[in-house]
Amino acid sequence: MSPTYERLRGILLRYISASSTEAMLQVACRKANVAPGDLGAPQLEAVLAEISHGIRLFCPPERQAEMMLALAELAE
């Protein structure tokens, strides 16, 4: 896995279960046509767009703003 993928995974794991994180990342990468090993800054926006629905489903509402902030910092 790429360093960007691992950082993204680490952020998600702080807020969402491991199984949900893995499933969300696999689906998001597939939909964004990005191999997890190739995920870098240029592809990050597309992957983040794909996981936004999963965030609303799996992250507790009271933690979503904090999680989105952490993801935005990753995308900078």
Image: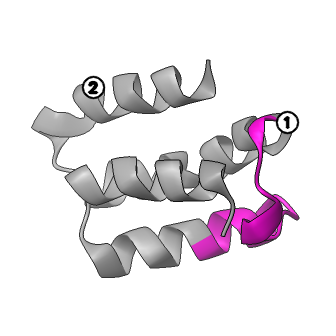
Q: Which residue is mark 2?
A: 65
- SS assignment at label 1: helix
> Residue 28 location in percent, x, y?
66, 63
> Vertical placement of 65 versus 18: above or below?
above
> Residue 33 location in percent, x, y?
88, 64
> Vertical placement of 68 versus 28: above or below?
above
Provide the major secondary structure of the magenta segment: helix
Q: Quadrant of residue 69?
A: top left
**How far, Cα to Cα, is label 1 from label 2?**
24 Å
Q: Nearer the viewer, residue 4 or 48?
A: 4
Q: Amino acid at mark 2?
A: Ala
* Mark 1 Cα-neighbour bin, 10 Å: few <14, some 14–19, many ≥20: few
* Mark 2 Cα-neighbour bin, 10 Å: few <14, some 14–19, many ≥20: few
Q: Residue 38 lies in magenta, yes or no?
A: yes
Which residue: 53% across, 58% down? 6
Q: Quadrant of residue 35?
A: bottom right
User: Which mark identifies residue 42?
Assistant: 1
Q: Amino acid at mark 1?
A: Pro
> Vertical placement of 25 versus 40: above or below?
below
Q: Quadrant of residue 1?
A: bottom right
Which residue: 30% across, 75% down? 18
Lower position in the chain sequence, tag 1 or tag 2: 1
Q: Nearer the viewer, residue 9 or 25?
A: 9
Q: Residue 20 lies in magenta, yes or no?
A: no
Instruction: Classify the position of the C terminus by image quarter.
Output: top right
For this view, does 21 lie left or right of residue 49? left
Residue closest to the far front: 3
Magenta-tinted stretch:
26-41
For this view, does 66 lie left or right of residue 2? left
Q: Which-is-in-front pick, marks 1 and 2?
A: 1
- SS assignment at label 2: helix
Which residue: 49% across, 49% down? 7
